Amino acid sequence: MSISVSPPAKAHVITSDAEAIEVAKVLAARFAEEASVRDRDRRLPVPELDEFAASGLWGITVPKAYGGAGVSYVTVAEVIKIISAADSSLGQIPQNHLGVLDILLHTGSEAQKRYYYAKVLDGWRFGNAFSESKSKNVGAFQTRIRFEGEHAVIDGEKFYCTGALFAHIVPAVGVDEQNRAFIAFVERDNPGLTIIDSWDGFGQRTTASGGAVLDAVRVPLSAVIPAHKAFDEPTADGPISQIIQAAVDTGIAHGAFEQALIHARLARPWVDSQQEHGWQDPYTIAAIGDLQWRLHGADAILAKAGRAIDHALASPSEESVAEASVIVAQAKVLSTEIALLASSKLFELAGTRSVLGKHNLDRFWRNARTHTLHDPARWKYHLIGNRLLNGIQPPRHAWN
Amino acid sequence: MNSPAIVLPSQLAAAAHDVRLARQGLEQTVIFVREQARPWALSGLNKAVDDPYIIGKLGDLQIRIDVADALYQRAEQFIGSASETLVATAEAVIASAEALQAVGNVQQELTGSRPASPSQEGREPLRWQYQIIGNYRLNDVVPPQLQE
């Protein structure tokens, strides 16, 4: 299936953190209206994405020196959370776009930064062709990049390419003969690049996280950045990549919790409770209290992680990056827990009527279960415990 | 009935106390594991500090304590109505009590002893903190401490 990508609409340029939050709230209210229908029919959010990018939210992390607002990562996380509460597929789509903008900051040349940041402020969207499903693990890449004079040539096969279908530029990771990772900014219509709309997961259904085939894709050297350097040296790139994951999941938890409040109010009273209304049930009330404090806890740690990232960006060091990794890992664990819990408790508190197809409330659990698999939460407890017990700094890569 | 002006700080102080005890308990457990714990003979490990399940449990406790601390700070700095402030305090009380319980359980398992329980004097019952939060959020009911 091929999808034509509309050329970038001239984007608004957001100039402050407060404006970013306001814009996100307005957009989220609109995105919420048809989120359930898009999920049910797997209708890809084409006009919504155009509106999302045109709002300027895809450019808020462009540094001030390059004309952007250079907002705090507390704000970035809040924006992604707000959008994800309305539609978590839409919240996930800019995930790699934002990650790549940070890798560009750390590893691009001055000319490259000027060129690509200007494109982003103009409304261009970056997708990604990073992950591979056939390599030994997520950190291993089979896609190769060869340098030939003034050009680089990339060959390989990618999967989980969130956003690529709708992107104007598809940043693709390939490794050279020394197994060092580079990112090539491949334009969507570049010969040799094929994006496949093959994602049929049961959650995050409209992220179009399909595949990409790169068959002798040729780009000028000016379109290639040495991405490996973002991890050779301590940079905030790993934590930045991760906080966006945690923000999506925190957003799903908020969306599910709001529905739990609505549908628990509609539930019939249980016969043994001797109450008139379901919402008077003492156990239901306490269960809502339990969800609420956990949700606020996840919010609080997410914001703390944003501050730790701001600090690591301003003063990069082994220590500041490790600290950011640890706090982001906490946000990842807490957001995973509350997203799964809230989206499941929702049904318990609302009763059997809440599982009817017309409500499509299962989308929250399907989205939470799917998106939280990005990287396993069980290794976040390990990362945190190993630093505490053994003083071992978290390994630096895009998943920490 | 206590006036909220009295109730609120004492409940928050209890939360702070629990967070402090939880941190101490985790610290003592970490020291014990480093200095005295032995790996399980059949684990194939040479040192207890390499035990993946100990590492995971300690990481989990660190999360519980840090989230309790974050909710304590949130409650302490909270600006809002009396009801919202009291609900924020209830959230900090729960988070810190649960963190301390979790630390106690792991400390018991890994070291064979557990910290002394904090005095419950002057504390509102933990089980009703969930109700206060839930009834406010679900049903807009003002917390009982603030009702006439």
Image: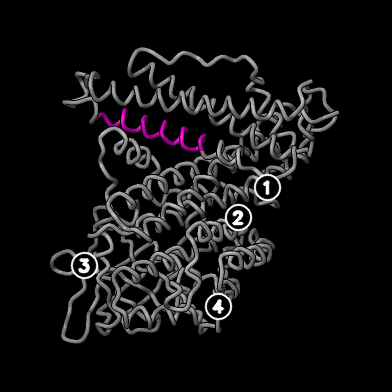
Q: Can you identify the residue that label 4 sits on?
A: A13
Q: Distance between the residues labelled 1 and 3?
A: 44 Å
Q: As rendered, which of A323 and A216 lies closer to the eye?
A: A323
Please tell me whether mark 3 sits on a helix, a strand or a loop: strand
Between discs 4 and 3, the one toward the N terminus: 4
Q: Can you identify the residue that label 2 sits on?
A: A85
Q: Can you identify the residue that label 3 sits on?
A: A175
For the residues beneath circles 1 and 3, the answer to whether they share a chain is: yes
Magenta stretch: dominant secondary structure: helix
Which residue type does callout 3 highlight? Answer: Val
Which chain letter goes with mark 3? A
Front label number (2 vs 4) = 4
Which chain letter goes with mark 4? A
Q: Is residue A285 above or below residue A34?
A: above
Please state the horizontal and vertical placement of residue B37, each as a whole percent of the image.
Answer: 25, 19
C-beta proximity under 8 Å, tags 1 and 3: no
Q: As rendered, which of A8 and A303 lies closer to the eye?
A: A303
Q: Is residue A113 above or below residue A93?
A: below
Q: How far apart are marks 2 and 1 (CA)?
A: 9 Å
Q: Which residue is drawn at 48% across and 75% down?
A: A68
A334 sits left or right of B76 in the view: left
Which residue type does callout 2 highlight? Answer: Ala
Q: Does the magenta stretch include residue B60?
A: yes
Circle 1 Cα neighbour tier, 10 Å, few/some/many (<14 / 14–19 / ≥20):
some
Q: Is residue A239 magenta?
A: no
The magenta segment is B51-69
Which chain letter goes with mark 1? A
Q: Can you identify the residue that label 1 sits on?
A: A258
A384 sits left or right of A260 in the view: left
